[in-house]
Image (spheres, coloured by chain):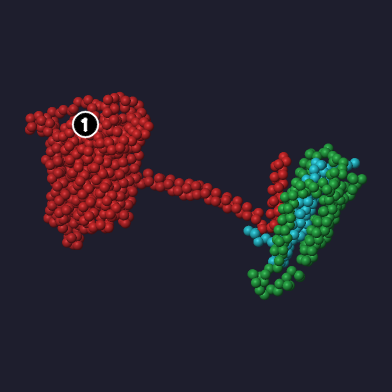
Chain colours: A red, B green, C cyan
């Protein structure tokens, strides 16, 4: 377990090594370093988890302090922590991350910035691991900022085009808004507790919950205030309403980047952070409800937009936003296990979906518009079957992973009798199945709608790309069994607690509220499970009616013609970007221009110019005395003497 | 008696000083300076410094002013032309400053020395022997240095006034003998 | 009636002022020089007057030195004027203004 600190460091080393060597070495060397680092990290993660689970201290958190740092009353150490939550996150990040690295070798093989890509990707891995393994909020925040930076670097990877750098900037700036709130939350924590250490803070809260219940700021208790601030940070990082606008534009980056950063890992940091801070959120019921509401709203909002998108990556982007909404819905309801479970399964099938789409795009020679695709089933078999597995998973069809994780979320809503939230969640599940299968049908079924040239170019991807697809598909298929709902245990296993992941993550939750676990009757639970499957199947059916078989785009077009206003609204993503532009960005730009031209140009530069002008003026005036005339100089002497005499005598 | 001498020669000194400063012709100015120096010499005598007075006439008037006259004649200086308008400010300031200086000095003198009367002259004070004794007793070093200074002045004057060597930078075609004799 | 010492001093001050005016006002170099001699002379007068007042011969001896210095200065100054005239054909100090900006 002493190797804990290596987990984030190894990818950093890989990035540094590749960064220094650069394009001078062969591609093989770059690849070896770039793949070796995350693989080593993955192995260390597995080893450490193995050790941790078998250790005496389990399930207490294991903290490795590298460097204690105290200034006065403030003490923040450079320390890493291994506990069940960190274990799950670290495993997901390194495993999926490594597979995506492998995939990238094939996908990016023709790019001229190959080395740069892997430097950034390794850098990202390191930062993400810092985030999940940090033992205090500061290390997590360093990782938080680091992944934001890498996101910017990788979105803007194709820097010589016009849009990617703009998208990168947009991502970074929107994130920053969230980060500001995050920092405010951290300040509140540090001034109250004098430290940002997880163990210390949560221990204190657990011991004395009333301490954080008193009035703090803006009419909120400390827990509510901090929870709200942290959640706003999560809104930015995890693309919830209203700070989600950067994620669809982030698709300008290379597809493996979208898979890793904007599906499996970075965007989930917000969910991780809420789960990590569960002690605080448990004591802030109002804020938690707010979290759940935002999550649900985002889920349905993004799902409706996904229904009308034509770019395959945009569909997946909005799908990610929607699924993240699910995770926050769960976290807001206090079902932190469900949130993390869905995070893990989502990582598998969303990464698979993105990589699969990357495979399709690669085969189509760069084309991303689904209206040009169709009938690719025969030409891209491996891609098709793995993509299908992922789509079934995300739609919540048993026994694939998505079914189990999504079901737990919905069960939590039912258990707390939050019927509105449940209804939104259920409906969105149907929408999810619908738009995902729409994508499948448009891409893989029917007849090919592209050009002759594209038809010739279509070919299955090389094994280096299809290998990870298969592995992820297996994951998407079986990962669900880690979280079988307890009810099945009751029916089939004679009362055993078969929800392994629930059991595993349980120690992470602070015992601040001794809430009664919601126990439903077996029959009720089975009813809701079947209901969610039925809704999913309905969604698939609707999609197949509109887009399946040979229908292709025709029925979709008819729908669009019958409801043109709705169609326009959805295609233009509810005009959110345009609204932001008019209400926030333009006034801000006007103010900035005023400060630039007016204040900086006229006032500040003006005062400098004034100073220079005065100096010049003084010089010019002084120059008048140097006439070169001896008589004048003699007069100056004499005047000086007269002045001196006056001063002495008077 | 003493008062009369003072008044006459004092007035003479002032008037001739004014002529020195105001007259256009440099020759007349120089000659007027002679008159001023003579008058001052008389005043020296009145103050009980006969040696200095005589020295003034001999050295100052007899040598220095004569030197001035030589140079004036050598350079054949003409009457100074009417000055251009530009020096008006200079003149105003100069007169004002000088007047201010004189006023201040006068005021100071008045305040400090009113009532201080000069005592009667006695043999001891005027005596040349005593003067010489004091000169070579207390002021021996300055005396010797003055000698050195005069030597330096002589050398300097010679070097400065020398005609420039035709081979070292002067116009080769110029006839040096025609210079400065116009 | 004896002449009060202050009268001598005032006379010297007046001569000094006249000499200064001349030195600062005239354009002819020689005349400027003459004014300077005038100033030196007035200083001599002051020194002798004080010497008499304080009954100390030091003042007279200083006058001796002043005289010698004046002589040296006159010699060098006039030599300078001669050199200047050779180069510029003029003694007018207003024309000698190479150091003008």
Direction from residue A149 to residue C24 in the image, left or right:
right
Q: From the top left corner, tell me how far across and down residue C28 is, in percent.
A: 75, 60
Q: Quadrant of the C terminus of chain A?
A: top right
Image position of A408 with respect to C67: above or below: above
Q: Residue at x 73, y 53 (%)?
A: B144
Query: Which residue position holds label 1?
Result: A60
Q: In terms of image quadrants, where is residue A230? A: top left
Residue A356 coordinates in the image, percent (x, y): 18, 50
Nearer to the camera, A645 or A536: A645
Q: Nearer the viewer, residue C62 or A386?
A: C62
Residue occupying image coordinates x 27% and y 58% = A24
Indicate whether A280 appears above or below B150. Answer: above
Q: Is residue A339 above or below residue B75?
A: above
- Chain hosting mark 1: A
In x, y percent, where is residue A74? 35, 32
- Outermost residue on the bottom side: it is B173
Report whether residue A366 is seen.
Answer: no
In this rendered view, identify the residue nearer to me: A622 or A399: A622
B43 or A466, which lies in front? B43
Query: Residue, x 34% and y 42% (percent of image)?
Result: A176
**Quick check: A216 left or right of B34?**
left
User: Which residue in the rendered view is the most extreme toward the right?
Assistant: B1
Q: Is residue A268 above or below residue A412?
A: below
Residue B10 is situated, as x and y percent measured from the top left of the image, at 86, 49
Query: What is the quadrant of the N terminus of chain A in the image?
Result: top left
Q: Residue at x 65, y 54 (%)?
A: A625
Query: How many callouts does the rendering have?
Result: 1
- Judging from the image, what secondary structure is the residue with disc 1 in? loop
Q: Please rate how many residues cluster around mark 1, counting C-alpha atoms within 10 Å: few if below 14, some from 14 to 19, many from 20.
A: some
Q: Is residue A586 visible?
A: yes
């Amino acid at each position: 377990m002493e190797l804990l600190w290596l987990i984030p460091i190894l990818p950093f080393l890989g990035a540094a090594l590749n960064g220094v060597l650069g394009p001078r070495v062969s591609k093989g060397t770059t690849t070896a370093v770039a793949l070796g680092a995350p693989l080593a990290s993955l192995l260390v993660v597995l080893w450490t988890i193995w050790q941790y689970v078998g250790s005496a201290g389990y399930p207490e958190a294991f903290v490795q302090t590298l460097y204690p740092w105290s200034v006065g009353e403030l003490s923040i150490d450079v320390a890493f922590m291994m506990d069940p939550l960190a274990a799950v996150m670290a495993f997901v990040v390194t495993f999926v991350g490594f597979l995506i690295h492998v995939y990238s070798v094939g996908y990016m093989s023709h790019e001229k910035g190959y080395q740069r890509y892997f430097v950034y990707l390794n850098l990202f891995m390191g930062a993400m691991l810092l985030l999940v393994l940090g033992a205090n909020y500061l290390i997590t925040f360093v990782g938080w900022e680091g992944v934001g930076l890498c996101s910017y670097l990788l979105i803007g990877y194709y820097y010589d085009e016009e849009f990617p750098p703009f998208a990168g900037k947009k991502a970074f700036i929107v994130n920053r808004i969230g980060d500001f709130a995050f920092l405010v939350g951290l300040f509140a924590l540090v001034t109250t507790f004098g430290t940002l250490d997880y163990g210390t803070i949560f221990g204190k809260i657990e011991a004395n919950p009333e301490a954080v219940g008193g009035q703090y700021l803006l009419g909120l208790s400390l827990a509510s205030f901090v929870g709200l601030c942290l959640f706003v940070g999560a809104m930015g990082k995890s693309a919830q309403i209203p700070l989600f606008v950067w994620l669809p534009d982030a698709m300008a980056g290379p597809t493996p980047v979208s898979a890793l950063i904007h599906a499996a890992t970075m965007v989930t940091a917000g969910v991780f952070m809420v789960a990590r801070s569960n002690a605080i959120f448990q004591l802030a019921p109002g804020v938690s409800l707010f979290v759940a509401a935002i999550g649900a709203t985002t889920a349905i909002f993004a799902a409706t937009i996904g229904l009308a998108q034509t770019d395959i990556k945009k569909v997946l982007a909005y799908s990610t936003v929607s699924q993240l909404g699910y995770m926050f819905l769960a976290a807001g309801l206090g079902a932190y296990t469900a949130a993390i479970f869905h995070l893990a399964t989502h990582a598998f099938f969303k990464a698979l979906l993105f990589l699969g789409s990357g495979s399709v795009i690669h085969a189509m020679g760069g084309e991303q518009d689904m209206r040009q695709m169709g009938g690719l089933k025969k030409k891209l078999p491996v891609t098709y079957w793995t993509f299908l597995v992922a789509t079934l998973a995300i739609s919540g069809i048993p026994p694939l992973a998505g079914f189990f994780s999504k079901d737990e979320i919905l069960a939590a809503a039912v258990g707390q009798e939050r019927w509105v939230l449940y209804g939104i969640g259920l409906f969105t599940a149907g929408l999810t199945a619908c738009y995902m299968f729409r994508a499948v049908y448009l891409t893989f079924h029917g007849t090919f709608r592209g050009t002759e040239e594209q038809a010739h170019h279509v070919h299955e991807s090389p094994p280096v790309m299809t290998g990870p697809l298969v592995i992820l598909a297996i994951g998407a298929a079986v990962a669900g069994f880690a979280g079988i709902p307890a009810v099945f245990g009751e029916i089939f296993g004679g009362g055993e607690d078969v929800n392994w992941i629930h059991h595993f993550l349980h120690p992470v939750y602070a015992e601040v509220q001794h809430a009664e676990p919601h126990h439903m009757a077996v029959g009720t639970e089975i009813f809701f499970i079947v209901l969610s499957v039925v809704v999913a199947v309905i969604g698939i059916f609707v999609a197949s009616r509109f887009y399946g078989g040979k229908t292709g785009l025709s029925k979709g077009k008819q729908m669009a013609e019958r409801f043109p206003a709705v169609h326009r609204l959805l295609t233009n993503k509810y005009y959110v970007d345009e609204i932001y532009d008019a209400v926030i960005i333009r006034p801000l730009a006007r103010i900035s221009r005023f400060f630039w031209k007016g204040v900086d140009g006229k006032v500040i530069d003006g005062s400098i110019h004034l100073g220079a002008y005065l100096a010049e003026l003084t010089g010019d005036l002084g120059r008048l005395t140097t006439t070169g005339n001896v008589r004048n100089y003699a007069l100056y002497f004499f005047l000086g003497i007269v002045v001196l005499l006056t001063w002495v005598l008077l | 008696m003493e008062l009369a001498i003072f008044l006459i020669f004092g007035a003479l000194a002032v008037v001739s000083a004014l002529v020195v400063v105001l007259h256009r012709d440099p020759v007349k100015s120089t000659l007027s300076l002679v008159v001023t120096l003579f008058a001052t010499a008389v005043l020296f005598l009145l103050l009980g410094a006969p040696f200095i007075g005589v020295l003034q006439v001999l050295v100052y008037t007899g040598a220095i002013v004569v030197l001035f006259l030589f140079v004036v004649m050598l350079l054949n200086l003409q009457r100074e032309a009417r000055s251009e308008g530009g020096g008006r400010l200079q003149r105003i300031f100069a007169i004002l400053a000088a007047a201010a200086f004189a006023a201040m000095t006068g005021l100071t003198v008045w305040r400090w020395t009113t009532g201080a009367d000069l005592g009667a002259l006695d043999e001891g004070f005027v005596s040349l022997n005593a003067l010489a004794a004091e000169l070579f007793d207390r002021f021996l070093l300055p005396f010797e240095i003055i000698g050195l200074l005069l030597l330096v002045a002589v050398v300097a004057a010679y070097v400065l006034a020398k005609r420039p060597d035709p081979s070292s930078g002067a116009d080769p075609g110029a006839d040096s003998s025609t210079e400065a004799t116009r | 009636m004896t002449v009060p010492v202050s009268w001598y001093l005032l006379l010297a001050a007046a001569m000094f002022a006249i000499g200064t005016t001349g030195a600062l006002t005239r354009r002819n170099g020689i005349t400027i020089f003459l004014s300077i001699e005038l100033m030196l002379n007035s200083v001599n007068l002051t020194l002798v007057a004080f010497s008499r007042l304080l009954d100390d011969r030091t003042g007279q001896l200083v006058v001796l030195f002043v005289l010698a210095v004046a002589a040296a200065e006159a010699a060098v100054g006039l030599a300078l004027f001669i050199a200047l005239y050779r180069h510029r054909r003029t003694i007018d100090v207003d024309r000698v203004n190479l150091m003008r900006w």
